[in-house]
Image: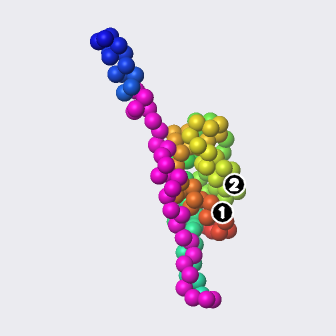
């Protein structure tokens, strides 16, 4: 019995601590509003911009490999507005994949859904620098 416990306890511990950061709350975060209705014909535009909103996401999740020059086998850099905006569709597709799926980025684990939604809103809003 003790031998079985010696084997099972480390195995169970390994399984518990090897979980990724993907969680249901990542999928259910509210989408931030980009335009606030003020009146019938008036709107206050809180536009999502690369420099304010998207660049920090890219810097903390992508630049470890997608720097200039790229490292760790990354095929291209994502340092400047031009580099990210020209590949915005591919960036959105790869960060939207679940951890473990082929070509999912970043390889360390999925970014929060709120960040993915912000990238999507930036693209839909016209890729403002």
The residue at 45%/36% (across/down) is 19
| In magenta segment, residue 43 | no
| 54 relative to 9 in the view: left or right | right
Q: Residues under labels 2 and 1: Cα distance?
A: 8 Å
Give percent across and percent down for residue 126.
67, 68
In the rendered image of this protein, does residue 100 appear above or below residue 89? above
Quarter occupied by residue 2: top left
Res. 125 visible in picture: yes
Kindly identify which numbered label has been placed on residue 123. 1
Q: Is residue 83 visible?
A: no
> Residue sitting at 56 percent across and 81 percent down?
37
What is the x, y in percent for residue 7? 37, 15
Q: Quadrant of residue 122?
A: bottom right
Give the residues in magenta: 14-41
Give the farthest residue toward the left.
2
Residue at 66 percent across and 63 percent down: it is 123
Q: Secondary structure at mark 1?
A: helix
Answer above or below: position of 51 versus 17: below
Residue with the mark numbered 2 = 89
Q: Is residue 23 magenta?
A: yes
Is residue 126 placed above or below 102 in the rendered structure? below
Secondary structure of the residue carrying tag 2 is helix
Q: Which corner quadrant holds the C terminus?
A: bottom right
Residue 3 place in picture, x, y as percent: 32, 10
């Amino acid at each position: 019995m003790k031998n079985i416990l010696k084997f099972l306890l480390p195995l169970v511990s390994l399984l518990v601590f090897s979980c990724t950061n993907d969680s249901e709350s990542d999928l259910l975060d509210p989408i931030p509003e980009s335009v606030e209705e003020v009146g019938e014909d008036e709107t206050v535009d809180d536009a999502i911009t690369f420099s304010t909103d998207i660049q920090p996401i890219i810097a903390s999740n992508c630049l470890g490999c997608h720097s200039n020059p790229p490292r760790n086998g990354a095929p291209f850099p994502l340092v400047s507005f031009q580099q990210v905006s020209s590949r915005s569709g591919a960036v959105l597709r790869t960060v939207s994949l679940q951890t473990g799926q082929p070509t999912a980025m970043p390889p360390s684990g999925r970014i929060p859904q709120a960040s993915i939604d912000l990238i999507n809103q930036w693209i839909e809003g016209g890729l403002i620098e």
